Amino acid sequence: MPGTLLTLVTVLLALAWVFPLYWAFVTSIKPENDTVALPPTLWPQTVDFSAYTYIFQNSPVVRWYLNSVGSSLVITALVLLLSMMCAYALSQIDFRGRRWLYGLILAGFMIPFQASLIPLFILVNKLGLVNHMLGLILPQLAAPVAVVIYKQFFDQIPPALGDAARIDGASEVRVLFSIYLPLNWSITFSLAIVTFIAAWNNFLWPFIVMNDTSNLTIPVGITQVQSAYGVAYAKTMATAVTAAVPTILAYLIFQRRVTEGVMASAGLK
């Protein structure tokens, strides 16, 4: 009986989680007038895909897509590279101030991004990077979670492996990418997926720093889809569904890796 009850509760929670996604898709395939009809229907009386046709023909949604894909890929690659190199230095290289630097990175967990939003925007504005792709990307490269996860894995690798390579004349860069990185491909892959999804879904910073319609990312571009009479719900939902497709596919294909990355990140907070 407890098992049945637990299953029932789990199913109900799953349905509650899925319902907004279902409602967004159903709304996107309704005629615009039916989206505000009362009482609302769980399935459209007339299936209409004109909202999808409209957004692709009358809004720069393809450009928003390209902006999101480009910025998310660059952010993911740079976050992994910088975090890996920083973690390697903290784990394997004995230099002055190492403990102080690691404590500073850990302190990054206690500062929410929203708290640094205004000074960050002032800095980016003074650098002339507002409405520029660099202004969008650079502030998102700080990832203390990735640094700490990498450091934990590097700490578990026997130092003798690196010492043997150094005796043979290998540089620290060679040791990192030829010995330590191949031993941590699984965590690198998990972090890459989680970082890409987070960068793709990021709304607040792109909304603040980008003000040219053609430079928007897809989550921010959704807010720009309107009709002459106000918010067009079918078109807005069509844009939202279109924007969600890459993250849904990424999660379905790499579900196990995403779960491992989220659990590794959650274990550090």
Image (cartoon, rainbow, N blue to C red):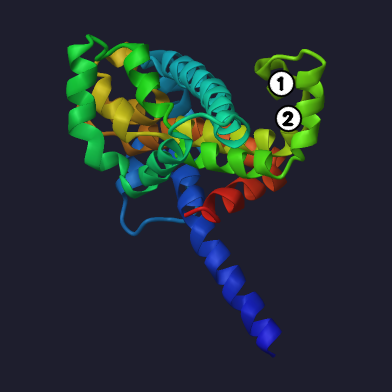
Toward the viewer: 250 or 17?
250
- On the question of residue 229 being in view, the answer is no
Give the label on residue 177, or none. Answer: 1
- At label 1, which amino acid type do we have? Phe
Q: Position of residue 14 (x, y in %)?
A: 57, 63
Vertical arrangement, residue 102 with respect to residue 6, above or below = above
**Left or right relative to 187: residue 202:** left
Label 2: element kind: helix
Q: Position of residue 127 (x, y in %)?
A: 23, 11
- Among the 4 quarters of the image, the one containing residue 174: top right
Residue at position x 43%, y 26% from top? 141
Label 1 neighbourhood size at 10 Å, few (<14), some (14-19), many (20+)?
A: few
Mark 2 touches mark 1? (CB < 8 Å): yes
Q: Distance between the residues labelled 2 and 1?
A: 6 Å
User: Where is mark 2, residue-wise?
Assistant: 180
**Left or right relative to 212: residue 180:** right
Residue at position x 37%, y 13% from top? 133
Vertical arrangement, residue 245 with respect to residue 10, above or below = above
- Among the 4 quarters of the image, the one containing residue 104: top left
- At label 2, which amino acid type do we have? Tyr
Residue lying at the far bottom in this picture: please name it. Answer: 1
**Left or right relative to 258: residue 63:** left
Toward the viewer: 153 or 35?
153
Toward the viewer: 139 or 151?
151
- On the question of residue 221 being in view, the answer is yes
Q: Quadrant of the N terminus?
A: bottom right
Vertical arrangement, residue 175 with respect to residue 43, above or below = above
Q: Where is residue 188 in the image (x, y as percent from the top left)?
A: 66, 33
Label 1: element kind: helix
